[in-house]
Amino acid sequence: MADTSPSWYFDFISPFSYLQWQKLKDGDAGIAVTPVPIVFAAILAARGQKGPAEIPGKREFTYRHVLWQSRREGVPLLFPPAHPFNPIAALRLCVAAGSTPAAVDAIFEWIWARGQAGDSADALAAVAARLGVAMDAITSDDSKAALRANTDAALAAGVYGVPTLAFDGQLFWGNDAHEFALAAWRDPAVLADPQMQAVSALPVGTARRG
């Protein structure tokens, strides 16, 4: 088992983050994670990537895939009124509430279980009241700085997508990588065998230009 508690990087814009949170919030399989809200759009910009919801065709497939996963996992899921949406207010609310499991759960439940908007402080007023967070805290300099610091830390750790579980210098991206992450958490030897190690030195045969 890994030596340190995993960091769990996520953004409320991501329904896959919502799904993985259902497995993590109660300490699934002995993992107690530290939730770290980050700005997914900033990660994409830094990595020179587009999000799946920004690519026609992939957008529709992604939405159907997450609905299929939610039904398979028995997790209620309703899409908010529009997607993608601007999640900054939701992320800052989470930070202002201390990024506690209760705060993460309440915001995810509002957006992805109830299908409510999470794209402004006004839209999140009911959640903020439930969490005891003053509305002006969402737009405070402290909340903005903390969210920026979280995102910078994610970039420094090598994060390229959400959700991502990180421990012992390893990154496990996506709800569909959850079992892989659990296996590596329980037994570090999972990543230590020769084939797992060899891929780090696998030569690049060709690179796409432009």
Image (tube, rainbow, N blue to C red):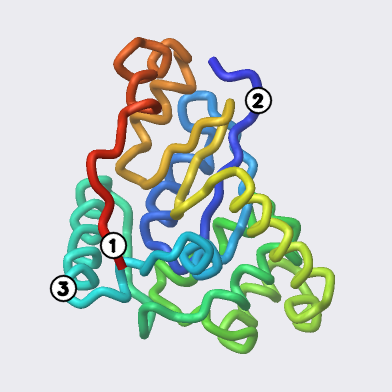
Residue in the foreground of this view, choosing between 182 and 48? 48
Q: Secondary structure at mark 3?
A: loop
Residue type highlighted by circle 2:
Thr
Residue 31: x, y in percent?
54, 29
Can you identify the residue that label 2 sits on?
4
Q: Position of residue 116 (x, y in %)?
A: 44, 79
Q: In the structure shown, which secondary structural element does the residue marked by tag 1 occupy?
A: loop
Label 3 belongs to which residue?
57
- State whether residue 135 is above or below residue 46: below
In the figure, is residue 168 to the left or right of 196?
Answer: right
Dot 1 and dot 2 residues touching (CB under 8 Å)? no
- Work out how far the residue at label 2 is from the one at label 3, CA to CA, in angstroms: 39 Å
| Residue ID at (43%, 38%) | 172
Residue shown at 52% from the left, 55% from the top: 10
Q: CA distance from mark 1 to mark 3?
A: 23 Å
Please say if the residues under marks 2 and 3 sit with CB atoms less than 8 Å apart: no
Residue 176: where, in percent of width, then height?
30, 43
Which of the two labelled residues, at mark 2 and mark 3, occupies the earlier sequence position? 2
- Whether residue 118 is situated above or below residue 159 in the rendered picture: below
Amino acid type of disc 1? Answer: Arg
Rendered image quadrant of residue 126:
bottom right
Q: Is residue 58 left or right of residue 164?
A: left
